[in-house]
Amino acid sequence: MKKIYLILALLAGTLTASAQTDAVAKEVAGLAKKSKESVTADSAKPWKFDGMLSLTASQTSLKNWAAGGDQQIGINILGNLNANYAKDRHSWQNSVLCQYGALRLIDENDEFRKTDDKFQFSSKYGYALSKKWYYSAIFDYKSQWAKGWTYNNKYDKTQPEGPDNIYRTRNSSCWSPLYLTYTVGFDYQPNEHFSLYLSPLCGKTTVVLNDDLADTGAFGVDSTKHVRSEIGWYLKANTAFNITKQASLNSNITLFQNYKDGGFLNEVDVDWNLIITFQINKWLAFSFVSELIYDEDITIAEKDNPDKTHNSLVQFKDVIGIGLTFKF
């Protein structure tokens, strides 16, 4: 029941935000916006390109600091590129989202630890059935750039590493996991700020190329395989608009349920991304990026006991920063 409430609350929040867009600016300048071209788009300029690159860096230095703390340096990179085509009844929307962040504790002489890592490519083709409805097909590719680790909080650096004193355990790597989504359905676009995509037939493939991770059955794949394929229903809702002249919001939620799981809203995969940006001046901007994931096929290891794992956990990540931003 809690899962159903969570899903309905996320979807309701996205739909509520869309209802407020009629009172805001008519042009979307937000990060990773979903621009919608009408069927009467200017044939001389069928393509529209936009994007944003952001670099945020931080450093904390301490000396004889009575209150305590850790000296650290960190960096976050965010990039979003959009290429959208519209002519006659045809539309083709493409986007690339890249995120990477790392942090190093200076006092511990520690390595850079990954704090954010994502690469996602999305492509949607639509054929206009009416002014607001499209017959559409979506292909989505999502993975990451680098290896990921679960660090043991009880690791003793004064002792040699061994089975009872493990420093870190790998939990992911490039293409482990790799999520591929391909679906056909109907896309409702009442205005340029909101779209709701519904599909009764969606294929989802989870790939785990790393042998060690695949052998443990990570990310829901069978321990004897590297690939897991699922077929189910799919929903995607996107809202993008300007909150103010300087601030913009983009919310994207996807729901997927494997038909084999059975039962209404049973074991529904949830992926909700929220990006808010505030342009301080031409080159400086504040950004808030968050992601919520619920997937019962993903197991989470305890930091104090990497051998003990849990599933059915809600994953949440947020990144806040002020840094150099270039929009085009």
Image (cartoon, rainbow, N blue to C red):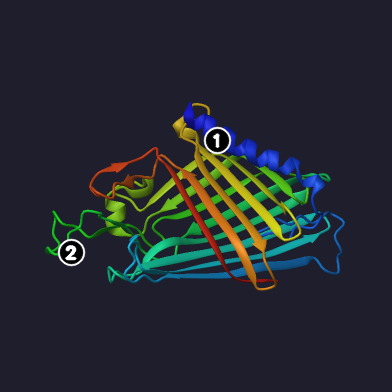
> Going 61% across and 38% down the picture, which residue do you hit?
11
Quickly name the residue at label 1.
7
Front residue (pair 73, 37): 73
Regarding mark 1 in the picture, which secondary structure is present there?
helix
Using the numbered discs, state the Cα–Cα distance from disc 1 to disc 2 in whole angstroms.
43 Å
Instruction: Give the class, few, some or many, for how many residues have Cα within 10 Å of label 1's Cα (few <14, many ≥20).
Output: many
Q: Where is residue 158 in the image (x, y as percent from the top left)?
A: 14, 64
Q: What residue type is labelled 1?
A: Ile
Residue 296 against residue 83 in the figure, above or below: above
Q: In the picture shown, does residue 203 fall above or below 286? A: above
- Residue at numbered disc 2: 157
* Left or right for 297, reference 12: left
Q: In this view, does 142 lie to the left or right of 16?
A: left
Q: Nearer the viewer, residue 7 or 110?
A: 110
Relative image position of residue 175 (x, y in whole percent)? 41, 61
Give the quarter of the image for residue 116. Answer: bottom left
Tell me: 17 left or right of 75.
Answer: right
Q: Is residue 131 or residue 299 the one in the foreground?
A: 299
- Which numbered disc, 1 or 2, marks the residue closer to the eye? 2
- What element does badge 2 sit on? loop
**Badge 2: how crowded within 10 Å, few (<14), some, or many (20+)?**
few
305 relative to 145 in the view: left or right: left
